[in-house]
Image: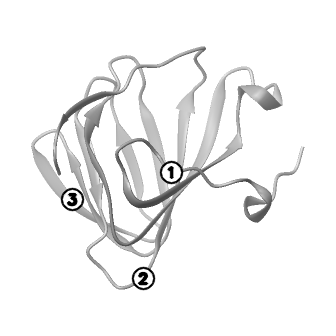
């Protein structure tokens, strides 16, 4: 299967600001173990502090720079950086720059996974 990002309908993630999400490969496509998402944070975009008790994340920054909070630490990440967020770890995202930030996020496939919001970024 080949999926072109521009052909996938963009969604607005819950509670996010100036952010788009595209499910590139998901359970709907028959993927048995992992799902792949592409996020775009426009300038001023943010995803509030949240966690997933049973889901880890692997992410790769495709374009731009942003700040990610992981646990109680802040990290500036840029194009070419890889990020790992363990299950149960609070995290958030903020694009304070002038250009879009794009990143890939790979998660284990689950029938349902919980998102617990734990404050603002």
Relative side of 77 to 61, left or right: left
| 44 or 60, nearer to the observer | 44
Disc 1 is placed on an element classified as loop
Decide: is 106 above or below 116: below
Residue located at (39% from left, 17% from top): 54
Residue located at (82% from left, 52% from top): 3
Residue located at (9% from left, 42% from top): 72
Instruction: Determine whether label 1 and label 2 are within 8 Å by CB.
Output: no
Q: Which residue is mark 1?
A: 12
How would you rate the neighbour count of disc 1 (Cα within 10 Å): few for under 14, some for 14-19, many for 20 or more?
A: some
Disc 2 is placed on an element classified as loop
- Spot occupied by residue 8 in the image (x, y as percentages of width and height): 74, 54
The extreme bottom residue here reads: 98
The chosen color scheme is one colour
Q: Which residue is mark 3?
A: 75
Q: Which residue is mark 2?
A: 99
Give the number of the mark in front: 3 or 1: 1
Who comes first in sequence, dot 1 or dot 2? 1
Who comes first in sequence, dot 3 or dot 2? 3
Distance from disc 1 to disc 2, alpha carbons, whole Å, reads 18 Å
């Amino acid at each position: 299967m080949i999926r072109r990002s521009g052909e996938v309908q963009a969604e607005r993630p819950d509670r996010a600001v100036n952010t788009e999400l595209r499910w590139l490969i998901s359970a709907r496509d028959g993927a048995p173990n992992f799902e792949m998402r592409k996020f775009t944070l426009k300038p001023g975009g943010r995803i509030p502090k949240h966690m997933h008790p049973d889901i880890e994340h692997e992410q790769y920054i495709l374009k731009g720079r942003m700040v990610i909070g992981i646990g109680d630490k802040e990290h500036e990440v840029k194009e070419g950086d890889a990020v790992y967020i363990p299950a149960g770890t609070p995290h958030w995202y903020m694009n304070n720059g002038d250009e879009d930030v794009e990143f890939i996020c790979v998660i284990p496939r689950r029938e349902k996974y919980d998102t617990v919001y734990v404050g603002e970024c």
